[in-house]
Image: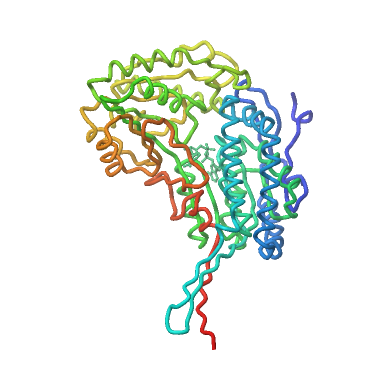
Amino acid sequence: MTQTTLEVLKNYIGGKWVEAKTDKTEPVINPATGEVIAHVPVSSKEDLDYAVEVADEAFQTWKDLAVPRRARILFKYQQLLVENWEELAEIITLENGKNLAEARGEVQRGIENVEFAAGAPSLMMGEQLSTIATDLEGAVYHYPIGVVGGITPFNFPMMVPCWMFPMAIVTGNTFVLKPSERTPLLANRLAELLEEAGVPEGVFNIVHGAHDVVNGLLDHEKVEAISFVGSQPVAEYVYKRGTSNLKRVQALAGAKNHSIVLDDANLDNATTQIMNAAFGSAGERCMAASVVAVEDSVADEFIELLAKKTNEINIGDGQVEGNFLGPVIREGHKERTLEYVETGEKEGATMVRDGRDDEEVKESGYFVGPTIFDNVTSEMKIWQDEIFAPVLSIARVKDLDEAVNLANKSKFANGACIFTKDGGKVRRFRETIDSGMLGVNIGVPAPMAMFPFSGWKDSFYGDLHANGKDGLNFYTRKKVVTTKWV
Ligand code: NAD
């Protein structure tokens, strides 16, 4: 198909679908087939400036709308998302490649964020102290901050934008979203449904594109805050540039998540959980299991069972029910992953399962079979780098302390999991691991709307995380009023 027969996506600004002022476009590709399914405009700074002006104008009235009325729009939005659940999941699978069951789960996570944000009338309540001195009382009130920019990654086209804009707009801000140029389709559907839910013009806007739009948001004087989710180098860049322009920035970054399997663990559960956590969504999850530190005494048994279960995985187009492992996002990412597999071999890791041998790797989609290395050490690149693909490294350790010390050497600290029945060891793990999202006998401590998504070290830059009360506080500022009644 040529570009002329395919849709060039429009930006959504001021409640209208508008053409970007640019000739530059990028193809949107179904990664399971390599087929071009649309084109996304690489919008200009002019497009972004226009969206920010429109959002700023909308802010002047939206901020004063009663909080329960803003919340009511989100209740309607929640209904519409539920009604369109399957269609939303299908769009995610089409543009991202994850299987339909995972896509349905992602829609659920997004809906939960809308449900949490719809609690704004209670969440935004302030606090009072009736007597701070004789005849003197104090109170704190929450207010929105203005225009917020959101920059999102390809791997969760629904969930990650939903970490941001529902809470941002329900608290009275207006929003400009720059979705990933690799998965831009779902964002437009989210906007259509938000319009149907009754959100006024200019409150939520989308500007598609890449660096110019990101830089435009980071530099625009009318943008008060930036929520970013993506890879570590870009997160660091966004945080530094945004804060040097005196904006609030929360930048959620990359990961290399460790799981620890102790000798008393239920190995059937541990292998199932770790297999899903390592190879689900083709390893393209910021909470994916990337390294397993397993106690020597059970290592052979663990690896044998894990390899057996991994061999039963169905690889293929995520649109076909029953396929578990879909493609990675692009040809370039597949090539980079295969280079990492070669590097792992050269570095001396032991190949347990070679994903290059799977038949689907030769197909036109960007498939990489599940790959498992044993005897991986912290000196190896496959241990250090976020590969973001279905490649799992196993390190053998003598005990819990060695496992925790190993995990703590990583510059990343998004998530960590332990598999054991020993409560004392769970406690020691909790107290000594440098990581912000912990799992006990589960593979993925998935982010939930009511808790902050709490990465540490180079997995997060900022103070207030996404989600939970952190999210509310990030998108609001306070007035403290001291009153003497005379
Ligand atoms: P990415 O960093 O390539 O892109 C993220 C966003 O930044 C996109 O909108 C992109 O257009 C923009 N961008 C990319 N390069 C840029 C540059 N040089 N200048 C300005 N903007 C730029 O990330 P990705 O590949 O889309 O997503 C995968 C990454 O996101 C992984 O590293 C993953 O761990 C991370 N992630 C983290 C979390 C978390 O909660 N910590 C959640 C999801 C994904």
* Residue 46 appears in the figure: yes
- Position in image of residue 52 (x %, y %): 67, 57
In the depicted view, which residue is nearer to us: 281 or 388? 281
- Position in image of residue 301 (x %, y %): 30, 16
In the rendered view, does 82 fall on the left or right side of 218? right
Q: Is residue 261 above or below residue 232?
A: above
User: Residue 255 is drawn in which quadrant?
Assistant: top left
Report the quarter where the C terminus lies: bottom right
- Position in image of residue 271 (x %, y %): 38, 21
- Position in image of residue 111 (x %, y %): 61, 41
Say how the picture is coloured: rainbow
* Residue 21 appears in the figure: no
Residue furthest left in the image: 398
Q: Residue at x 64, y 53 (%)?
A: 175
In the rendered view, does 17 fall on the left or right side of 378? right
Q: Residue at x 27, y 32 (%)?
A: 422
Question: Exactly how many numbered labels are in the figure?
Answer: 0
Q: Is residue 109 above or below residue 309?
A: below
In the rendered view, does 448 fall on the left or right side of 72? left
In the depicted view, which residue is nearer to us: 173 or 262? 262
Report the quarter where the N terminus lies: top right
Q: Residue at x 37, y 19 (%)?
A: 268
User: Residue 272 is drawn in which quadrant?
Assistant: top left
In the depicted view, which residue is nearer to us: 109 or 483? 483
